[in-house]
Amino acid sequence: MHIWVDADACPLVIKEILFRAARIPLTLVANQLDRFLSRHGSS
């Protein structure tokens, strides 16, 4: 299983929770670099 998240539509708080809690691969997809991605890398 793999989680894909629309980073443009997802609130920052939820992205933080997902990033910390994910035990399976997590991919954030965005049209532009946001504050979360710039702090945690854009892998």
Image (cartoon, grey):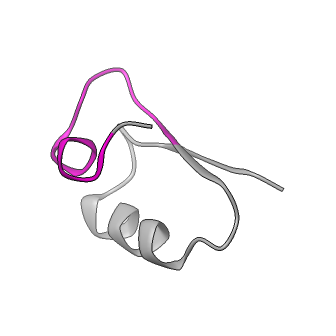
Q: Residue at x 24, y 29 (%)?
A: 33
Q: Is residue 31 left or right of residue 4?
A: left
Against 23, residue 33 (above or below) is: above
Against 27, residue 16 (above or below) is: below
Numbered marks: total: 0
Q: Residue at x 38, y 61 (%)?
A: 15
Q: Which residues are magenta?
A: 28-41
Q: In which image quadrant can residue 34 be found?
A: top left
Nearer-the-camera pick, 43 or 30: 43
Q: Quadrant of the C terminus?
A: top left
Q: Is residue 26 left or right of residue 41?
A: right
Q: Quadrant of the N terminus?
A: bottom right
Q: Residue at x 38, y 67 (%)?
A: 14
Q: Residue at x 31, y 58 (%)?
A: 11
Residue found at the far right of this picture: 1
Q: In which image quadrant can residue 41 be found?
A: top left
| Picture coordinates of residue 37, whole percent (x, y) | 27, 43
| Picture coordinates of residue 24, whole percent (x, y) | 70, 65
| Picture coordinates of residue 13, whole percent (x, y) | 28, 69
Against 42, residue 14 (above or below) is: below
The answer to if 24 sits in the magenta stretch is no
The answer to if 40 sits in the magenta stretch is yes
Against 9, residue 32 (above or below) is: above
Residue found at the far top of this picture: 31
| Picture coordinates of residue 4, whole percent (x, y) | 63, 45
